[in-house]
Amino acid sequence: MTTAPEFTLCEQLIVAASEAWRGNGELVATGIGTAPRLAASLAKVTHTPELMMTDGEAWLVEDPVPLGPRGYDDRKPAGYLPFSRYFDAAVWPGKRHAMVSPSQIDRFGQMNISYLGGTYDQPKVQMLGARGFPGNSIYHINSMFIPAHSKRVFVEGEVDMVSSVGYNPARRIPGARFDFVDLRLIVTDLCVMDFGGADNAIRVIMLHPGVSFDQVQEATGFALEAAPDIKETPAPTPEQLAIIARFDPYNLRASVLKDNPAGKRS
């Protein structure tokens, strides 16, 4: 008799997030942040090996680069892709799928990384600014990783500043093209969601073990839709846990979620 492996909630979320890239084909998988990067690495070495990844500097690599300190001579470069060529090679033609962690998301997937509260000229909290979010959201696939699901992130109404294009029907400008907008998956510490609701609104497709739909709704600032067949988020396999540990030898994933909770909730 074999016993199920012990795992953390973060490791379960990494496995769930890796599914965002399943079947994507030959495009650049960009995970921004510890968990999204590990999720992209897991996707490449398991179910979608044709994914491309970079070393974060100037090279495409055959094997995902582990997190933390690492030598420069042990990577396997597969091609030259400096930042100066990244837009033309990956972003503009839609050959990229990024997983990001915005500060706010609304019902139709509009994201905010610019400021919180106040006005554009006098914000209460100044953040990054829109950066590359407007262009990225128009031309290539995007998914999201949210380590703390709350109404502060999933806001009522619109986000404080629309930094990236979503599916909001009220924002559709006549004559403009929105057919390249492609939002895929949202992974949080409570559930997994997609954009399969009415008018591409956010809906819940998976609940993590021990979490109810009502709990997710209580932590969300807008009315959620539920998929007709909500599933339970699967536990990581021993093989997946071993791959995650290989790409995170310094256990940086332990700091992603507060107190690094276990995957099996009481």
Image (cartoon, grey):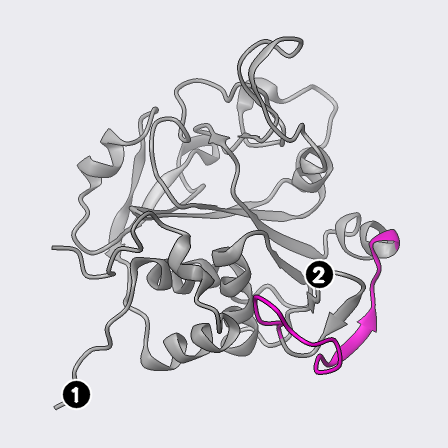
Magenta-drawn segment = 64-84
Q: Residue at x 28, y 59 (%)?
A: 233
Sequence order check, earlier mark of 2 and 1: 1
Quadrant location, the N terminus = bottom left
How packed mark 1 is, by other alpha carbons closer than 10 Å (few <14, some 14-19, many 20 or more), is few
Q: Residue at x 31, y 32 (%)?
A: 224
Between the C-alphas of marks 2 and 1, the distance is 39 Å
Nearer-the-camera pick, 232 or 12:
12
Q: Residue at x 55, y 64 (%)?
A: 40
Q: Is residue 213 above or below residue 255?
A: above
Quarter of the rendering containing residue 27: bottom right
Left or right for 205, reference 116: left
Q: Is residue 223 above or below residue 88?
A: above
How packed mark 2 is, by other alpha carbons closer than 10 Å (few <14, some 14-19, many 20 or more), is few
Q: What secondary structure is marked by label 2?
A: loop
| Residue topped by disc 1 | 2
Return the mark for residue 56: 2
The amino acid sitting under disc 2 is: Gly
